[in-house]
Amino acid sequence: MKRTLLTGFVMGVLGVSLFSACSLLHEHAVVRFSEERLARAHELSAEQRAPAAYRRFESARKRAETAPADSAAQSDYVSEARLWLEVAVTQAETIALSEQRLVLEREVARLDATFLAERAAERVRDEQRELAAAADIARQEAQRALARAALAPAQRIKLGASELERAARSLLQRAELIALALPPDLASPGRSELTQLVQQARAALPKTPDQALSLADRALFRGLALLGALRRGQTEASPESKASLAEALTLLGGTTARSERGLSVSFGPAEANNARLLERLCSVISAYPVGPVQLLFPGRAAPSEAWRKATQPGCDEARVQVRAEQASKTLSVAFVAY
Amino acid sequence: VAELSARLTLLKSQSRDPQVRGPADQAALALARAQDAKQDSAARTRSLDIARAALALAEARLVLLAERNLKQRAEARQKSAAQRAQVEARSSARQNTDAGAATGDATQ
C-alpha cells in the first residue's frame, strides 16, 4: 500500500514538473518574424507613425509566443501578427509619403503665389504703360490743339482771362529764358525785336491777356530763331538737336515723321497759306541751321507769297528749297540733316 | 461577421490592384473559416481577428496607392510650376531690359 502511494506521489510530482516545464517552454517559445519587415518598420518609425497597428502586432506576437508551439492557435496568432506588422508598415509608408507630399504642395503653393504676384505686377506695369501712353497722346493732342488755336484765334474756344494770362506768362517765361541764354555779344536785329516783343507782352498782360498771349507766342518763336546763331558752328545734327527739333515741330501742331528725307512735319491744306504758321516755321528753320530744308507746298505752281513774306534771315533760298507738289495735299517740311 | 463582410465587399468594388486583392482574399478566407468554426469559439475568434487584420491591411494598401498617386500628381504640379516660374522670370527680365532701353531712348 505504502509502495503504491509512494509511486503515485513520485508520478504526481513528475507529472507536475513535466507540466510546469512544458508551460515554461510554451511561455518562452520564440516566434520568428521577417527581419526585413521588422527593419522596414523600424526605418519608417512605424511604432510612432502607426501606433494602433503596431500595438496590435505586439499583442498578437505575445499571444503567438505564449500559445502552444506548433498549435493551430499559434499559427493563427503568427498570421495575425504578420498582418498587423504589414498594416503598421503600410500606414507608416503612407504617412511618410504624405509628409513628402506636404513639402511638395507647400512648394507648389509658394510658386503659385509668386506667379500670381508677378502676373499682378505685370498687369500694374501694363496699366501704367497704357496710362503713360494715353497721357502722352493726350499731351501731344493738346499741344497740337493749342498750336492750331494759336494759328486761328477766331476758331479757338474762348478762354477765361486768367487762363489766357497764365498761358501768356508761361510763354513769356520761356521767351525770357531764351533771351538770357543768348550770348551777350550777339548783335542781331532779331534780338532787339525779341526784347521789344517781351516788353510789349508784359505791358499787355494786365489789360489785354489775349494780345499778350499772341505777343508772347511771337516772342518765343523769335527767340527760338535766334538760338540758331548758337548752333551755327555745328556741322552735323547731334541726337539732342534732333530730339529738340522734333519737340519744336510738335509745338507747331503738325504731324512729325522720320523718313529717308530726314525729320519731316506735315500740315493740312488749310494751313498751307497760314501766315502765322509760316512765320513760326521760319523761326524753327532758323533755330536749326544744319543742312538743307525742303518745303513742299500742295498743288501750287510757285512758292506762296505768304512764305516770301514770312522769310527771315536763316530761311534763305540757298538753304530752303521751296517746291510745289501738284499731287500732294499737305504742306510738308523736311529737315534733311535731322 | 456582417460588418466585416460589408467592408470586404466595398473594398473589392474599389480596387482590382493585386496588392489590395491579396489581403482582401485572405480576409474573405478567414471570414469563411470563422463561419465554419461555429462550435469552436476560440478558433472563430482567431479567424475573425485574422480577417480584421487582413482587411485593415487591404484598406491601408488602398490608401497607400491613393497617396502614391497624389504624390505623383503633386510632383508633376511642382515641376510644371517651377518651369512656369522659370519662363516668367525670363520674360520679366526681358521686359525689364526693354523697359530700361525704352527709358534710355526717352531720356535721349
Image (cartoon, coloured by chain):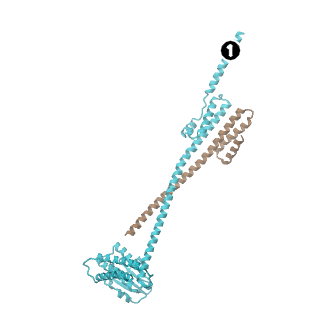
- Return the residue found at the far top: A2
Residue occupying the far left of the picture: A185
Please tell me which residue lies in front, A14 or A103.
Answer: A103
Query: Which image quadrant: the C terminus of chain A?
Result: bottom left
What is the count of numbered marks? 1
Q: Can residue A158 be seen at all in this image of the molecule?
A: yes
Task: Measuring from the top left, give residue A247's x and y in whole percent.
Answer: 38, 75
Q: Does residue A73 appear left or right of residue A266 in this picture?
A: right
**Residue A328 visible from this viewpoint:** no
Chain containing mark 1: A
Say above or below: A151 vs A41.
Answer: below
| Residue that numbered label 1 is attached to | A9
Q: What color was chain B assigned in the picture?
A: brown
Q: Amino acid at mark 1?
A: Phe
The crowding category of the residue bearing disc 1, from other C-alpha atoms within 10 Å (few below 14, some 14 to 19, many at least 20), is few
Residue A95 in the image, given as x and y percentages of width and height: 57, 44
Residue A160 left/right relative to A21: left
Q: Quadrant of residue A219?
A: bottom left
Q: Residue furthest front?
A: A207
Q: Is residue A38 above or below residue A249?
A: above
Q: Which quarter of the figure is the N terminus of chain A placed in?
A: top right
Q: Would you place residue A105 above or below residue A334 in this image?
A: above
Q: Secondary structure at mark 1?
A: helix
Residue positioned 64% across, 36% down in the render: A80
Left of A51 or right of it: where is B7? Answer: right
Q: Colour of chain A?
A: cyan
